[in-house]
Image (cartoon, rainbow, N blue to C red):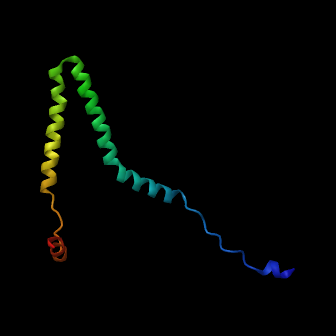
Amino acid sequence: MGYYYEQKPPDVEEGPGCLDALVITRAVFGLLFWPVAALILVVVDIGAIFYLFTLHPALALIPAGITGVALWLFARWEQRRERPPIPDDDITRLSR
């Protein structure tokens, strides 16, 4: 019987704690914030267009114009972004 009392208990690993869950949650929210914000902004913009269209058709051009200018500015910003250079081996592979 003394054999059972002399053994060390097996090492028990602790499960993930609260800090691990908070780190994962923050990472997921960090990735999803801008796409979700853009979707909400589009829904609000469409709602504003419809509401202003019910008041007067010409008023609907205001949020539509703002949306158009925002898309144009985003396209200009995207064109100016620095892109990484293409390696030489990719250029030769693409030219074949």
Q: Is residue 1 shown left or right of residue 93?
A: right
User: Total marks drawn?
Assistant: 0
Q: Residue at x 34, y 44 (%)?
A: 36
Q: Residue at x 18, y 36 (%)?
A: 67
Q: Is residue 38 shown left or right of residue 8?
A: left
Quarter of the picture holding the N terminus? bottom right
Q: Residue at x 16, y 28 (%)?
A: 62
Closer to the camera, 90 or 81? Answer: 90
Q: Is residue 44 shown left or right of residue 91?
A: right
Q: Residue at x 50, y 56 (%)?
A: 21
- Which picture quadrant has residue 89? bottom left
Q: Position of residue 26 (x, y in %)?
A: 41, 54
Q: Is residue 11 shown left or right of residue 61?
A: right
Q: Residue furthest right?
A: 1
Q: Residue furthest top?
A: 55
Quarter of the picture holding the C terminus? bottom left
Closer to the camera, 19 or 70? Answer: 70
Q: From what the image shows, is residue 28 above or below residue 69?
A: below
Q: Position of residue 53 (x, y in %)?
A: 22, 22
Q: Position of residue 81 (x, y in %)?
A: 15, 58
Q: Position of residue 56 (x, y in %)?
A: 18, 18
- Which picture quadrant has residue 60? top left
